[in-house]
Image (spheres, helix red, strand yellow):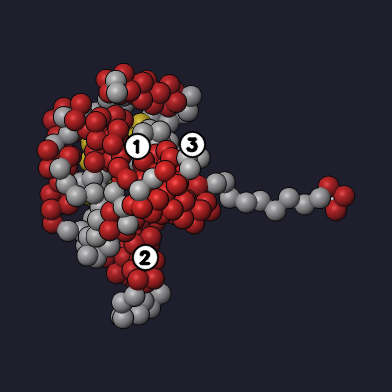
């Protein structure tokens, strides 16, 4: 994998894209995870103004620390980077109070609140994007955005551009190494940070990214499952199940077309 060429290509693509718009720079949320770390360095490499937002919502301390360390890394190497810390915890609490969130816990409530957190962050990103005339940069990778739909619709899926959406998680990790992303981020357990218990992505998906990437490739190639081990068959079925359940996220919003003779 030619990581340097990929980095150069993405940076060039970002510059070419923004030149076609009246906008001045980029705004991006940094979570302490590897995807946002890599993407933030890529947009910083354009040398255009970049606003990095840290948006904790009752965040786990180690994740906050990684995000802050990465922001320091960015500012040290890129003078075009500025940052803001916007604590959205009170906003979530106020929202829960208004909608009268029930005190008892359930998976569905936890999932709904996780998605709400993501949508609060999206609104914050677009607030600052509007204020400064910036583009909102997405941080989703290929398996998340087009494979298993591991993102929140109109949350972290609500972006203007997606610099790393054609790269798998494994490839993003390779770019992180090439970009000298801080070790704590490269070695951290992958999590979306949207749940109170800070559960990992693997726990939520039921498989690792490497397994899902393999299953995605096999499913796309239409491989006969009979030749695989029981675990491999399970992975392909898991991928197909996840992919089918999130088509409403991946595909364009359905539009009811009115027959022309009705007009």
From the viewer's perspective, is residue 170 above or below residue 240? above
Q: Mark 1 points at which residue?
A: 168
Tag 1–tag 3 contact (CB < 8 Å): no
Residue 173 horizontal/vertical position (percent): 24, 35
Q: Distance between the residues labelled 3 and 2?
A: 32 Å
- Residue position marked by numbered label 2 in the rendering: 111
Looking at this view, is 120 or 153 the one in front?
Answer: 153
Expressed as whole percent of the image width and height from the top left, the position of residue 204 reads 32, 58
Query: Among all residues in the image, which is located at the extreme front?
Result: 227
**70 and 248: which is toward the camera:** 248
Across and down, in percent, residue 104 comes to 31, 81
- Marks 1 and 3 sit apart, C-alpha to C-alpha, by 17 Å
**Rendering coords of residue 56 (x, y %):** 23, 55
- The residue that appears at 27% across and 58% down in the rendered structure is 203
Q: Residue 178's quadrant in the figure?
A: top left
Q: What element carries label 1?
A: loop
Secondary structure at numbered mark 3:
helix
- On screen, residue 250 versus residue 123, left or right, reads right
Total label count? 3
Callout 3 environment at 10 Å: few (<14), some (14 to 19), or many (20+)? few
Of badges 3 and 2, nearer the viewer stands 3
Looking at the image, residue 179 lies above or below residue 115 = above
Residue name at image x 43 percent, y 21 percent: 16
Q: Is residue 152 left or right of residue 252?
A: left
Q: Nearer the viewer, mark 1 or mark 3?
A: 3
Say which of 217 and 222 sits in front. Answer: 222
Q: Which mark is residue 221?
A: 3
Q: Of helix, strand and loop, which one carries label 2?
A: helix
Q: Residues within 10 Å of mark 2 (few under 14, many from 20)?
A: few
């Amino acid at each position: 994998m030619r990581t340097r060429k990929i980095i150069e290509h993405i940076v060039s693509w970002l510059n070419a894209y923004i030149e076609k718009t009246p906008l001045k720079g980029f705004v991006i949320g940094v979570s302490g995870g590897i995807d946002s770390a890599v993407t933030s360095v890529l947009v910083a490499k354009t040398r255009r103004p970049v606003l990095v937002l840290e948006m904790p919502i009752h965040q786990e301390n180690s994740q906050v620390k990684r995000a802050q360390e990465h922001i320091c890394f960015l500012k040290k190497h890129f003078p075009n980077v500025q940052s803001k810390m916007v604590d959205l915890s009170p906003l979530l609490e106020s929202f829960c109070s208004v909608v009268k969130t029930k005190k008892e816990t359930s998976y569905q409530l936890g999932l709904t609140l996780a998605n709400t957190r993501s949508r609060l962050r999206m609104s914050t990103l677009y607030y600052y994007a509007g204020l400064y005339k910036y583009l909102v940069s997405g941080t989703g990778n290929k398996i998340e955005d087009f494979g298993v739909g591991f993102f929140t619709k109109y949350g972290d899926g609500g972006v203007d551009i997606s610099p790393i959406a054609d790269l798998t998680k494994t490839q993003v990790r390779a770019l992180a190494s090439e970009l000298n992303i801080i070790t704590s981020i490269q070695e951290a357990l992958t999590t979306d940070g949207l749940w109170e218990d800070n559960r990992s992505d693997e726990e939520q998906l039921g498989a690792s990214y490497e397994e899902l990437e393999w299953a995605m490739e096999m499913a796309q190639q239409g491989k006969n499952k009979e030749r695989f081990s029981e675990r491999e068959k399970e992975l392909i079925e898991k991928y197909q199940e996840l992919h089918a359940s999130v088509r409403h996220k991946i595909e364009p919003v359905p539009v009811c077309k009115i027959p022309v003779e009705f007009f």
